[in-house]
Amino acid sequence: MRAVIIEDEKPAAEKLIKAIQKTQSAIEIAAVLNSIKTSVDWLQQNPMPDLLFMDIELSDGLSFKIFEKVNISSPVIFCTAFDEYWQEAFEHNSIDYLLKPVKQDKLETALNKYDKLKQHFASSFQHLMQWQQQPAGTGYKKRFLVKRGLDYITVRTEDIAYFYATHKLVCMVDNKNQKFILDQSLADIEKQLDPSQFYRVNRKYLVQLTAIKKIKTYPKSKLQLEIEPVVNEEVIVSQENVAAFKEWMGS
């Protein structure tokens, strides 16, 4: 499980990390963020974590402002020294509200609650997940079942902009720039999709035709693609793949 901590006091963040690892050593702390700005930037550029630990009063404002700028689907455990925000917290994905200093038994109870909710929804959707793994009647996948927080939602293939591989994970990005982690390889996903609509432009990216907004020439007879939603790196079609890519684009 991947978790992110949003906390502007370094000693409090370090203490929380130790408490989390003592309770569930398998939890990976993907990032520790110390402000609204850094939190918004990180959440917009990375797949949504499974769980958020969030302080409320940060150096640049209340953490509730993060929800105004990012579509957060993860459940949140709020950890704060103030008790007056509890009602508003439960309007923002909260599954628990812990007062500082966070007590070990309270943290364990909160994480147990998360595990029980996760198991409940996983069990409820198991049959739907199995059904979604089967290609549609045309032979190509019509939708993907993905996890958003504790829930599962379906995303239609026509609403997908691209898939990309990063750090041994495969992420799907839809037209609204929402990111979801998949448990399949790019090669397996490619086999399920209509090849007239999706193209494996390189080892890292599998792109929907409608997501390609501009094609530019690139040194050494390569091509550079501009895709939407925008990515923070160059998407290059190799020289060896240029001819096949042009044929696909013109077919």
Image (cartoon, grey):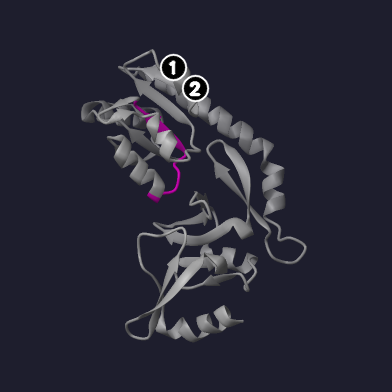
Image quarter of residue 240: bottom left
Please give left or right for residue 58 compared with residue 117 in the image. Answer: left
Q: Residue at x 59, y 37 (%)?
A: 151
Can you say whether 221 is above or below 114 in the image?
A: below
Which residues make up the magenta segment?
45-55
Q: Residue at x 25, y 29 (%)?
A: 59
How packed mark 2 is, by other alpha carbons closer than 10 Å (few <14, some 14-19, many 20 or more), is some
Single out the residue that lies furthest toward the right. Answer: 137
Residue 187 shows in this picture: no
Residue 131 shows in this picture: yes
Judging by the rendered image, the residue that carries numbered circle 1 is: 86
Q: Residue at x 74, y 60 (%)?
A: 136
Q: Are marks 2 and 1 in contact (CB under 8 Å)?
A: yes
> Whole-percent x and y of residue 227?
46, 65
What amino acid is found at the position of numbered circle 1 in the picture? Trp
Can you say whether 19 is above or below 165 in the image?
A: above
Please give left or right for residue 136 compared with residue 3 in the image. Answer: right
Residue 240 or 62: which is nearer the viewer? 62
> Whole-percent x and y of residue 19?
33, 26
What amino acid is found at the position of numbered circle 2 in the picture? Phe
Can you say whether 193 is above or below 116 in the image?
A: below
Judging by the rendered image, the residue that carries numbered circle 2 is: 90
* Element carrying mark 1: helix
Can you say whether 51 is above or below 173 in the image?
A: above
* Element carrying mark 2: loop
